[in-house]
Image (cartoon, coloured by chain):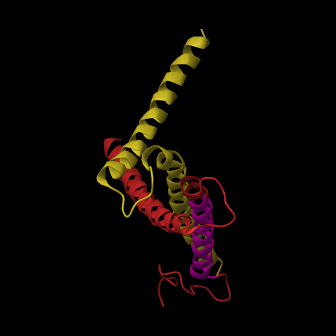
Chain colours: A yellow, B red
Amino acid sequence: MADLAEADEADLQRLVAAEQQKAQFTAQVHHFMELCWDKCVEKPGNRLDSRTENCLSSCVDRFIDTTFAITSRFAQIVQKGGQ
Amino acid sequence: MEGGFSSDSVGSGGGKLDPGLIMEQVKVQIAVANAQELLQRMTDKCFRKCIGKPGGSLDNSEQKCIAMCMDRYMDAWNTVSRAYNSRLQRERANM
């Protein structure tokens, strides 16, 4: 009986971890929307035109590129500062 | 019976907590929280886009703008979601 409970607990941990990962993804999308909506959408129309769609996609990619750029340059700065 | 537990998590123990039921509740709670987040942000953005100088009530054009804004916000949400997912897959492929 105790083994069954342990197996359930392991299952639960896996399933919860999967949901947490999904929740993290969703939180990031909300964050992107915060930034990219203002940059890309002017007056809301009957549909999103292709220029707006491209802007939104690019916005996500450029934000991630920015994150990488800042991370790596910051590491350099910290490294030099340590000398 | 061999094994004793199945991988589908509905009612697997005797009198123990049911992982399937727990997960259903977790998913519902997460979905509710996400909907609240979405509504709050959407309201903010659409207020900014649609309401200029606040008047005595929402006029017709403002109401129409709000409705369109909501639809476009959700379209944009889907676009951003797809873009992010694609990027994640690309990064994973490069690892």
Q: Is residue B34 magenta?
A: yes
Q: Position of residue B3 (x, y in %)?
A: 48, 82
What residue is drawn where x is 60% and y is 12%? A81
Residue B2, compared with residue A35, is above or below; it is: below
Q: Quadrant of residue A80?
A: top right
Q: Is residue A35 magenta?
A: no
What residue is drawn where x is 47% and y is 46%? A36
* Closer to the camera in the image, B75 or A23: B75
As drawn, the residue found furthest toward the bottom would be: B1
The quadrant the C terminus of chain A occupies is top right
Q: Position of residue B79 (x, y in %)?
A: 38, 57
Question: Left of B43 or right of it: where is B73?
Answer: left
The quadrant the N terminus of chain A occupies is bottom right
Residue B42, compared with residue A53, is above or below; it is: below
Q: Quadrant of residue B24?
A: bottom right
* Closer to the camera in the image, B24 or A70: A70
Q: Position of residue A3 (x, y in %)?
A: 61, 76
Residue B7, compared with residue B56, is above or below; it is: below
The mark tally for this picture is 0
Identify the magenta region.
B18-43
Q: Position of residue A6 (x, y in %)?
A: 62, 72
What residue is drawn where x is 48% and y is 81%? B8
* Closer to the camera in the image, A9 or A43: A43
Magenta stretch: dominant SS? helix
* Closer to the camera in the image, A26 or A48: A48
